[in-house]
Image (cartoon, rainbow, N blue to C red):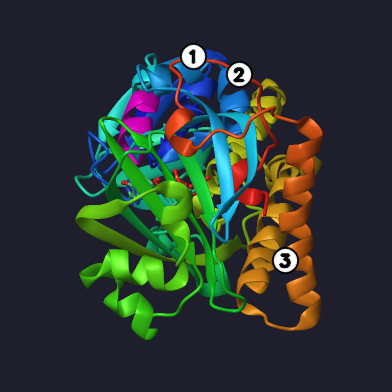
């Protein structure tokens, strides 16, 4: 006998887990399927910032996700060995798997099935989802949130994935030992070297760093990074220690190339793609989590009307992909991804001018807001849980 529900959410990473929690609270009967009963360790988004926090709070999920994680109320930006901006903006540093597992725990009323989905049959009325062990699930709507690794499932549905930018960016993640306990974003110092920024932030009992850059798989500096991380950082950011203070990289360095792509031929009856399954983002822009939240908020808005009338045809599903807010988020994520890459790789006078104008704009904003006294990162931590919320993109998108 198939397990029946209103909705089946396939994949419970941050996208699927958030969709399940939000739609369940909206009164839908939901079955969630994921290959892993507990989301395993994974190097992904490690901070919540700006309007990500705002939206999670408005969805009633923030407290459950961040739990006891320290809220850091201020962030410092620097370049060329000097602080250029210090602003009130709440940050939480937490492991991706902790975010996901906490979000899953908030979807208390949902049915969770552990297993690998091997087939999805869609139609106007009923959707059938088959697992590798033969279990069958039926629902009126499938929400596909399988991230970047669901290409076989997509192909079987006639859904392709267009590559917008292969290996668009490269992200390194590692722990650092430093006396600083605040949040620092330090921008690349040299024109055209493909280095975007290093962000250093509290992460439980330790300090964590993410370095975002635009270097390819055959780049010598990138290939040697793991074996000599501190030296590699100081080669591209020679004045970093003037702001951060002395530091050491400790433990394992993680590295990920980030492709940008988008699913195509998605306007099909009975199935909606959200998160990276629909469109992947450049981590340097920090729009991956924002896009997930915008997808879930859009679905939350549209789903009640879809379920109030018979059928789940492609016309209803099309409303999701045509939603003006969602389209704006998706397009902006791609625009910003190209723009940041251009700022870091191009040496032409026009790009140089844009880069220095942006840095200058940050300085001026900082003066205007007159944060009285610019704290060193080591002074910026406070356990105070709330503060003014910044722009949607968060600090990482403000260069
Ligand atoms: C290194 C790195 C750093 C990043 N940093 C940031 C950042 O600072 N800010 C930001 O906003 N974004 C960042 N991102 C992007 C962000 O992490 C992603 O956009 C987000 O994790 C995507 O979530 P998702 O739920 O769509 O997919 P995922 O988290 O990948 O979840 C997919 C789920 O589907 C399940 N699944 C897949 N196939 C099947 C199947 N056949 N059957 C059952 N289950 C299945 C998987 O088990 C998994 O649980 C970063 C990404 C990377 C790689």
- Per the rendered image, the range of residues in magenta is 96-104
Residue 249 percent location from the top left of the image: 26, 55
Quadrant containing the N terminus in the rendered view: top left
SS at badge 1: loop
Closer to the camera in the image, 283 or 251: 251
Using the rendered view, name the quadrant where residue 179 is placed: top left
Q: Closest to the observer: 328 or 322? A: 328
Secondary structure at badge 3 equals helix
Q: How many marks?
A: 3
Magenta span dominant secondary structure: helix
CB of residue at label 1: within 8 Å of ligand 1?
Answer: no
Q: Is residue 110 above or below residue 192?
A: above
Task: Out of 389 and 42, give the one closest to the viewer.
Answer: 389
Q: Which residue is depicted at the point 30% across and 51% down?
A: 247
* Left or right of residue 362, residue 259 in this image: left
Neighbourhood count class around disc 3 (C-alpha, 10 Å): few under 14, some 14–19, many 20 upward: some
Residue assigned mark 3? 355
In x, y percent, where is residue 263?
57, 61
Q: Earlier in the sequence, mark 3 or mark 2?
A: 3
Vertically, is 354 above or below 311? below
229 and 335: which is toward the camera = 229
**98 falls in the magenta region:** yes
Q: Residue 377, percent across and down?
A: 47, 37
Q: Which residue is mark 2?
A: 387
Report the residue marked by disc 1. 384
């Amino acid at each position: 006998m198939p397990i029946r529900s209103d909705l089946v959410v396939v994949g419970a990473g941050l996208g699927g887990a958030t969709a399940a929690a939000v739609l369940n609270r909206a009164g839908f009967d939901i079955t969630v399927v994921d290959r892993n009963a507990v989301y395993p360790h994974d190097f992904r988004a490690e901070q919540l910032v700006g309007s990500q926090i705002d939206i999670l709070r408005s969805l009633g999920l923030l407290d459950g996700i961040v739990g006891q994680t320290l809220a850091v109320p201020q962030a410092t930006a620097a370049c060329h060995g000097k602080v250029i901006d210090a602003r009130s903006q709440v940050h939480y540093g937490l492991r991706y798997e902790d975010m996901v597992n906490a979000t899953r725990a908030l979807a208390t009323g949902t049915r969770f099935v552990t297993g690998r989905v091997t087939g999805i049959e869609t139609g106007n009325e009923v959707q059938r989802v088959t697992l590798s062990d033969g279990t069958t699930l039926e629902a009126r709507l499938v929400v596909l949130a399988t991230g970047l690794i669901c290409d076989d499932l997509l192909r079987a549905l006639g859904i392709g994935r267009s590559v917008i930018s292969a290996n668009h960016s490269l992200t390194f993640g590692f722990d650092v030992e430093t006396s600083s306990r605040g949040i620092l974003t330090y921008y690349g110092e040299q024109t055209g070297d493909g280095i975007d920024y290093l962000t250093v932030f509290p992460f439980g009992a330790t300090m964590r760093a993410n370095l975002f850059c635009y270097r390819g798989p055959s780049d010598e500096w990138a290939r040697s990074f793991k074996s000599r991380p501190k030296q590699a950082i100081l080669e591209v950011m020679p004045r970093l220690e003037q702001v951060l203070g002395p530091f050491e990289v400790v433990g394992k360095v993680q590295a990920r190339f980030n492709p940008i792509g988008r699913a195509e031929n998605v306007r099909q009856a009975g199935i909606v793609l959200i998160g990276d399954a629909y469109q992947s983002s450049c981590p340097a822009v920090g729009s991956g989590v924002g896009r997930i939240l915008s997808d879930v908020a859009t679905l939350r808005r549209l789903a009640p009307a879809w379920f109030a009338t018979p059928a789940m045809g492609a016309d209803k599903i099309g409303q999701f992909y045509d939603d003006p807010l969602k389209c704006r988020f998706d397009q902006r994520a791609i625009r910003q991804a190209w723009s940041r890459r251009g700022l870091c790789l191009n040496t032409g006078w026009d790009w140089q001018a844009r880069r220095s104008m942006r840095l200058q704009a940050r300085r001026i904003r900082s003066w205007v807001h007159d944060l009285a006294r610019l704290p060193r990162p080591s002074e910026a931590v406070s356990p105070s849980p709330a503060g003014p919320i910044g722009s949607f993109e968060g600090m990482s998108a403000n260069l």
